[in-house]
Image (cartoon, coloured by chain):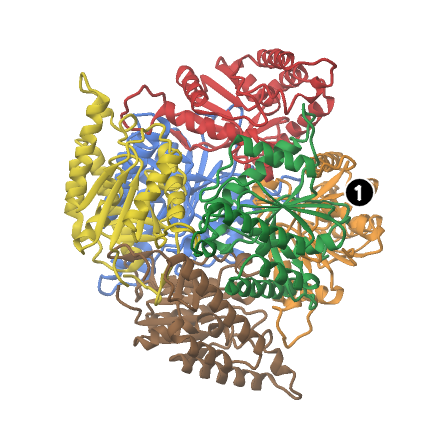
Chain colours: A blue, B red, C green, D yellow, E brown, F orange
Amino acid sequence: MSGIQRLLVVGAHAADFVWRASGVIALATERGAQATVLALSYGERGESGELWKEPGQTVERVKRIRHEQGEQAAKIVGAEFRCLDLGDYPLEVGREALDQLAQVIRDLAPDVIITHTAVDPFNPDHPVTHDAVMKARLLASGAGVASAFETVKPPVIYLFEPHQPELCGFVPNAFVDITPVYEKKLEAMRAVGSQQYLQKYYAELAERRGNHARRISGNGAVRYAEAFQRVTPLVSSDLIGHG
Amino acid sequence: MSGIQRLLVVGAHAADFVWRASGVIALATERGAQATVLALSYGERGESGELWKEPGQTVERVKRIRHEQGEQAAKIVGAEFRCLDLGDYPLEVGREALDQLAQVIRDLAPDVIITHTAVDPFNPDHPVTHDAVMKARLLASGAGVASAFETVKPPVIYLFEPHQPELCGFVPNAFVDITPVYEKKLEAMRAVGSQQYLQKYYAELAERRGNHARRISGNGAVRYAEAFQRVTPLVSSDLIGHG
Amino acid sequence: MSGIQRLLVVGAHAADFVWRASGVIALATERGAQATVLALSYGERGESGELWKEPGQTVERVKRIRHEQGEQAAKIVGAEFRCLDLGDYPLEVGREALDQLAQVIRDLAPDVIITHTAVDPFNPDHPVTHDAVMKARLLASGAGVASAFETVKPPVIYLFEPHQPELCGFVPNAFVDITPVYEKKLEAMRAVGSQQYLQKYYAELAERRGNHARRISGNGAVRYAEAFQRVTPLVSSDLIGHG
Amino acid sequence: MSGIQRLLVVGAHAADFVWRASGVIALATERGAQATVLALSYGERGESGELWKEPGQTVERVKRIRHEQGEQAAKIVGAEFRCLDLGDYPLEVGREALDQLAQVIRDLAPDVIITHTAVDPFNPDHPVTHDAVMKARLLASGAGVASAFETVKPPVIYLFEPHQPELCGFVPNAFVDITPVYEKKLEAMRAVGSQQYLQKYYAELAERRGNHARRISGNGAVRYAEAFQRVTPLVSSDLIGHG
Amino acid sequence: MSGIQRLLVVGAHAADFVWRASGVIALATERGAQATVLALSYGERGESGELWKEPGQTVERVKRIRHEQGEQAAKIVGAEFRCLDLGDYPLEVGREALDQLAQVIRDLAPDVIITHTAVDPFNPDHPVTHDAVMKARLLASGAGVASAFETVKPPVIYLFEPHQPELCGFVPNAFVDITPVYEKKLEAMRAVGSQQYLQKYYAELAERRGNHARRISGNGAVRYAEAFQRVTPLVSSDLIGHG
Amino acid sequence: MSGIQRLLVVGAHAADFVWRASGVIALATERGAQATVLALSYGERGESGELWKEPGQTVERVKRIRHEQGEQAAKIVGAEFRCLDLGDYPLEVGREALDQLAQVIRDLAPDVIITHTAVDPFNPDHPVTHDAVMKARLLASGAGVASAFETVKPPVIYLFEPHQPELCGFVPNAFVDITPVYEKKLEAMRAVGSQQYLQKYYAELAERRGNHARRISGNGAVRYAEAFQRVTPLVSSDLIGHG
């Protein structure tokens, strides 16, 4: 089982990766992998309400702050941060943006891509991101037959945990033990926002998923975990128990 | 990712493991794992028609031949063969047999168990086996809380590929590259039957699943594969790409 | 497309076939097919409340009346009526009854079996009947390989429409135009009960399913239909449009 | 919308109701409803490990302690506690026990029954309880037609939240605001166990479900909630928004 | 359980609300609620064939008649009628129309929105309407966190019954007793069309759904009902039996 | 059961029909039916890699070769070949192309249309084709009520088998025995490509599906089959066993 070498995390908004995947990013980069976070938008309209409470706030300033925060949080877990700045609420991914996304995949040739679920009745931009990633991945990797364009190996897709998992059709089948990097996740969460309650919410979630992972595996050493849904099959040279 | 150490394969009938999992058994035992094949019945009524064509055939003799064949095939892939001899068509797993099965799991403490799918409109004994394994596994491993009996770590469950996968609700999410042990699988198949057509059928299936595994992973070195459906989540210390 | 030659309809209670399948039975027998109705019980407890309103009623008398009514309704649509008299609410199908059922299937060797849905949150006996039929069918037809017992060709399975279809997971995929035999269905319904409202309910259902069948096929000649869910694939020598 | 008058909660083991439904029980009884908790077993084998750590422990004593704890917790939320003492791991509900359960439903004539999910890959007794409740409910309420036995109005069924909801197919569609009775729930949890960590786990769950309920309804006053899956349709005299 | 105060019904075509939801609209307005019907198109091409049989008919005149009929039917059940006139067969909802729809939701701040199912293999415009409503609702209500725009409380979503419910994935979980307002529904149906057969079809459907509601609830007083599928969870201050 | 008279096969790329449906096309045309193959694109970018290996290759030349091959293969099985040339990877079907497609359906008035599955994680163009066909079919056939435009009878829809059926949600419910025309299928496959391995792959698939069809039907004469998923219900004048 060779480790991941290049990880790409695609979120609809600048901070999505922090709450949902900063643990596994930290694990990967600590092992030497290259990690890139790509935000399709800054979430400047739908998820930056706190910033808009400041008098005289402007959209450009909101974006700049969100960029800095995203960059800072990514840095904490060893990743590069980029944003396509496509606008949010609603996020729309037209033909040109789709080509951009496919080009990023071609350029990075990631082993693994993490993105949103296909369904999210609480967020209009998450499913749009999911569909764009799935399509761009195919455009970049082809259909497994010889084609007229350069292709990369088809990246494995993981979905990260949405806010209300059962209502998004999310069924976790991969729990990653983030105990060794938990402090980094806490630090990354602090970097993207002053909202104490979100940090508490996701800290408790990590603990809860850790409990689940312990029960599933019988491995008492797991204290904190992130849950994912793997949607592409695993091809391996042996059956895998727990890793 | 530490490898499997103890593998248990539970089939309804004596030969099920050969067609469906002898490749992964061979891979595991070559790496040093201990593998046990447990047949709940010999399949003496429903799947031994060829033997019954011999004049003067008796049920005891059919069972003995099936046992020898199962033992021989298991040996080829490095596994031990056992049979509970519960009868087939219909196979029934009562309370006592369930306790036996749970005890086997407690004794072996396998990392991984492979068994049939929950649904099979072509075979009455496969779902019975599935349900018994799932229940016995829980009786042997408990609910993750302190209990009054000895428990083992909850084994990971894989389902092996049924004859008509789409009609059994089988969705493969784990393809194992059996190219290095493919000859052993062919040999094991020859050991359990003179039916050329079944050997041809499953040889072509291994090739077809190899094609699928190549397209999924982009790994051109996979020539033969076995497909499984993992039903318990993976708990690991890192995200897994392809192994 | 050769027509059905032997049709078997298995209901939990004596009158189930009348409301749900008497139209297709009449169509088949008019074409020369042999049709058998098998009731697993008389429904003497759960579905004979009207009869129990008579003073001094006995269970034997209720069963006799239900038998006569079933026989009469079956006769109207050209079928034979039998009952295993296993008791109802709850109906239980033990090993012996299962063997009886398998033997009926072996004896009749039906092309098609119609029975209840696998799920019915309104009736405890319908799913029991479904499961028994599915299992007995496999015991009678084997797994497609040579076996130690006589087997018949695997009958095609249709499920008939439950009272509240959406809540039983019923998805109709076969609408049969019963317009030519509609009067026989009305007559059969009159034979099994004095309850006007049930006759009205199912007459309106036939009309409603006729409307659906017209919209699906564009065939304006369909006035009355019965809806079924076919659960075994169709094997044919050509693609089929509408028949 | 008239309130519930009689609530029945059926758990596989003595303490199930506490973690999962003590909030809604307290809400109902505070409003004047009658609530009964029925445990099918004491969970003396599978869920009483802490008690078995005491030297010289006996099964009778474990059951007595579990009974007292269940009774005490039920009392705190205003409910009566009963136990059928059918044994656990594995719990089996035979014909006689099924009749007992149906009789309880007939006697209490509850408006609402709460029980376990149909699927639970972490507990062998929960699905057995679910199936028994669903069947007993039908035996007690009939199929909506005149029958030979006394029937009660068909109770509404809710499922309570399992430990790992997504892996049990649990999709919550009813969130109940338990903020007003939250202290009672905490007290009831203390009554059934000394395990601090379980109390912490379920306190955090109540908070998490409160967060979800706030986002779903936009009602900022909800602080703590219990989540349920309603499986029988709602029949009402008006459309319902949030209550 | 406070009643609905503001109800919004969004149909693809001018008359959809009449067949599917005029009963619940009448119930709501009789209780004092404000109800608005929003048609995305007049259905002038796909569902006005009768009007086009008149010689010299024009599209403008068809729309005017459909507007008057919609307005008249809405008035009968106490609702306001509006139409966005986006065209039908195919209906398309571009960015501007989506913003209009979101603005309507912001302006009305409905407690409940009723619209079409997500799937309808018989109508190209129904799923388009569904998707537009779901997206506009999120744009109007936000993701539950502070945002840069005004938000309303997230309205509850109900889907109305499609013509062939099982083939549209429709599973009714809310039956509303429209017996008290049934005459108004009949009158509203007469207002939108001279087609006797459609009025008969939906009158029989109301009766059929009334039968279902009686069986589900055991409430014998329900004579006519409309069926809906609620897709957003219920948040309430108590468990709900039947209302 | 009258045979199909007009068959339309719509593929995303020029050669899709050959691998997946050339058998049933040959069966239909041998019986006198008219068959049309419509390719939405030539697959010049994503599925013509072999052609691009020639030095100096141009897109126009690739398209011309693909057209000739498609025409040649179609001719072998008795069908006409057309291509809309909409471009591939990604294929996009805008409003104008949708109208073209609807017009083709109106002009041909096919009894049956065969196209791709709704889901295909290995190909971006297949689901686009599926959705366009489903929508165009409704625009051409209306909703079953009188409309302002000409309509045709709603064609029956079959989906053809994707490369990895289980991962595309493909559940075959119609197996067609192509034994009598198997040689034509082989010849058509040779016409569209020099890739030996694809021809071998699909020849083995036909054999495998033949094995399945034999087991399902008990009809030992089936040697080669093509598998399809019928998504529109069957309306017929009798129940159908195996044809």
Q: Residue furthest bottom?
A: E56
Percent coordinates x, y for residue F27 in the rendering:
80, 48
Q: Is residue A20 left or right of residue F154?
A: left
Kindly give the residue lying farthest to the front in the view shown. C56
Quadrant (top left/top right/bottom left/bottom right) for the N terminus of chain F: bottom right
Q: Residues within 10 Å of mark 1 (few under 14, many from 20)?
A: many
Q: Residue D76, position in %: x, y?
A: 15, 43
Left or right position of B214 against F15: left
Residue D194 percent location from the top left of the image: 16, 31
In the depicted structure, whether residue A48 falls above or below residue E126: above
Q: Which chain letter goes with mark 1?
A: F
Residue D179 coordinates in the image, percent (x, y): 19, 52
- In depth, the one of C15 and A229 nearer the eye is C15
Return the residue nearer the eye: D140 or A120: D140
On screen, residue C154 above or below F127:
above
- As helix, strand or loop, the secondary structure at mark 1 comes to helix
The kind of residue on which mark 1 rests is Lys
Does the image show residue F16? yes
Of residues E171 and D94, the one nearer the viewer is: D94
* Residue C215 location, quadrant: bottom right
**Residue picked out by circle 1:** F185
Q: Is residue B42 left or right of residue A206?
A: right
Using the rendered view, name the quadrant where residue E81 is placed. Answer: bottom left
Question: Looking at the image, which residue is at 73% across and 19% down?
Answer: B53
Q: Quadrant of residue B197?
A: top right
Q: Is residue A85 visible?
A: no
Q: Please tell me how many numbered marks the rendered image carries.
A: 1
